[in-house]
Amino acid sequence: MSEKNIELVRDLLEAFQQRDHERAFDFYDPDIEWDATTARESSPDLADVYRGHEGVRTYWRRWLSAWRDLEFEIQDVRAGEGDEVVAVIRNQRQWGRQTGIVTEIPPYGLVFTIRGGKVVRWRIYADHASALEAAGLEE
């Protein structure tokens, strides 16, 4: 099952990279918990728990409204304990919607909890080590 979950997360992230934002909802459980509380330091306006598809859309509307474009690299995707998958993201850059100024985000990690072939929980972590630890892994 872990290989299938890893592939699901890769497909989800690749859809986002290709700007196919609606396709991502094919991967989310209708009752998904989108936990951005650990991003309080870097994105205080977004640091909250969002629920369901509408909650995720609210999160992305808030985040993407500031940026004309963004890009990132998927450094690694691996299975954690149980139903968890960790994605390590690096080289994320985004261009300001109004200014065009490029900003960069330090490498970070995402932990996805998958059940029944759907993402039921998403969490963001400020660095790779924290995400790996949260999923029961070590660097």
Image (spheres, grey):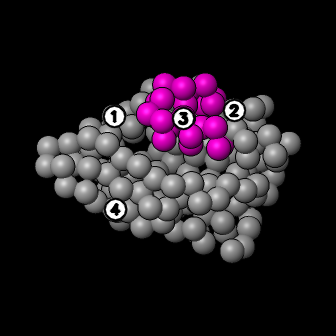
Quarter holding residue 25: top right
First-in-chain label (3 vs 1): 3
Q: Specify the segment rendered in magenta.
A: 9-29
Please determine whether, in this image, residue 102 is positioned above or below residue 32. below
Q: Which residue is mark 4?
A: 104
Q: Give the residue at x 36% y 47%.
A: 70
Q: Give the residue at x 44% y 61%.
A: 91
Give the amino acid type for the residue marked by disc 2 in the picture: Lys
Q: Residues within 10 Å of mark 1 (few under 14, many from 20)?
A: few
Give the percent coordinates (x, y) of residue 137.
74, 67
Label 3 and label 2: CA atoms lie apart by 15 Å
Give the percent coordinates (x, y) of residue 106.
42, 67
Provide the secondary structure element on which disc 4 rests: strand
Please indicate, yes or no, whether residue 84 appears anywhere in the rendered image.
Answer: yes
Give the amino acid type for the residue marked by disc 3 in the picture: Ala
Please determine whether, in this image, residue 12 is positioned above or below residue 42. above
Q: What quarter of the picture does the N terminus occupy?
A: top right
Q: Which residue is mark 2?
A: 118
Q: Which residue is mark 1?
A: 61
First-in-chain label (3 vs 2): 3
Give the amino acid type for the residue marked by disc 1 in the picture: Arg
Q: Give the residue at x 69% y 32%.
A: 118
